[in-house]
Image (tube, rainbow, N blue to C red):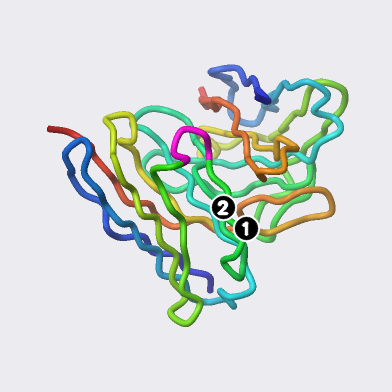
Amino acid sequence: SYVLTQPPSVSVAPGQTARITCGGNNIGTKGVHWYQQKPGQAPVLVLYDDSDRPSGIPERFSGSNSGNTATLTISRVEAGDEADYYCQVWDGSSDQRWVFGEGTKLTVL
Amino acid sequence: QVQLVESGGGVVQPGRSLRLSCAASGFTFSSSAMHWVRQAPGKGLEWVALISYHGTNKYYADSVKGRFTISRDNSKSALYLQMNSLRAEDTAVYYCARRSCGSTTCYADYWGQGTLVTVSS
């Protein structure tokens, strides 16, 4: 089965740039989607198709995907960005299965 | 606005059954495929099941195949998850989510607030 690998945690000071990676075999050939989840809340879609932002998501959120790594970049990090972030892909099977990364805890110092 | 509201969670003994519901509003439910995704306490997200907009096509994670059944009633804008032969490892918050598709693949653009299922004796 397809596996997505994320770092357990990333720490960044306010105003700096956070980069959260999502590794997978040839992930650059897949569409990657990113979700933000704050404690006690449901996930929220922040990026789809590697780098597109849903309405209401700040331009500070951007993404890239190439080779074996997809990256979520959060510029000018704010305290309110502190959350768990999950990447997600379709595993390419006929069963339409989704695969999620293990999640990355973003801490704003 | 799009709203998804889950219900039906609770405490259930191992081997028993439970049925979750998800009430949808604010969009044309009959035009959207829907997912169930779960999250064990302190753990990450796990995809559980998908049902097509018309209900004909259903897909399951290996961990629940043969035990869980996803269904929908478009006349009621409702999504269901029938969970049988429950195990301790099924303990999780269960989210319903609407599927949307971009230029490449599909994702969940709206999620409910979740309902907690605890399997314990």
Residue B47 horizontal/vertical position (percent)? 53, 40
Q: Which residue is label 1 attached to?
A: B99
Give the number of marks.
Answer: 2
Q: Quadrant of the N terminus of chain A?
A: top right
The residue nearer to you, when weighing B113 against A58, is B113
Is circle 2 on the same chain as circle 1?
A: yes
Residue B84 lies left or right of residue B76; in this view the side is left
Q: Give the residue at the far bottom of this rendering.
A: B75
Q: Secondary structure at mark 1?
A: strand
Residue B87 horizontal/vertical position (percent)? 28, 33
Task: Report if the CB atoms under discs 2 and 1 are less than 8 Å apart.
Answer: yes
**Residue at horizontal 56%, vertical 74%?**
B29
Magenta: main secondary structure: loop
- Boundaries of the magenta span: B61-65
Q: Amino acid at mark 1?
A: Arg
The quarter holding residue B64 reads top left
The quarter holding residue A38 reads top left
Q: Is residue A69 above or below residue A94?
A: above
Q: Is residue B112 above or below residue B3?
A: above
Chain letter, disc 1 residue:
B
Q: Which residue is label 2 attached to?
A: B50
Residue A22 horizontal/vertical position (percent)? 69, 25
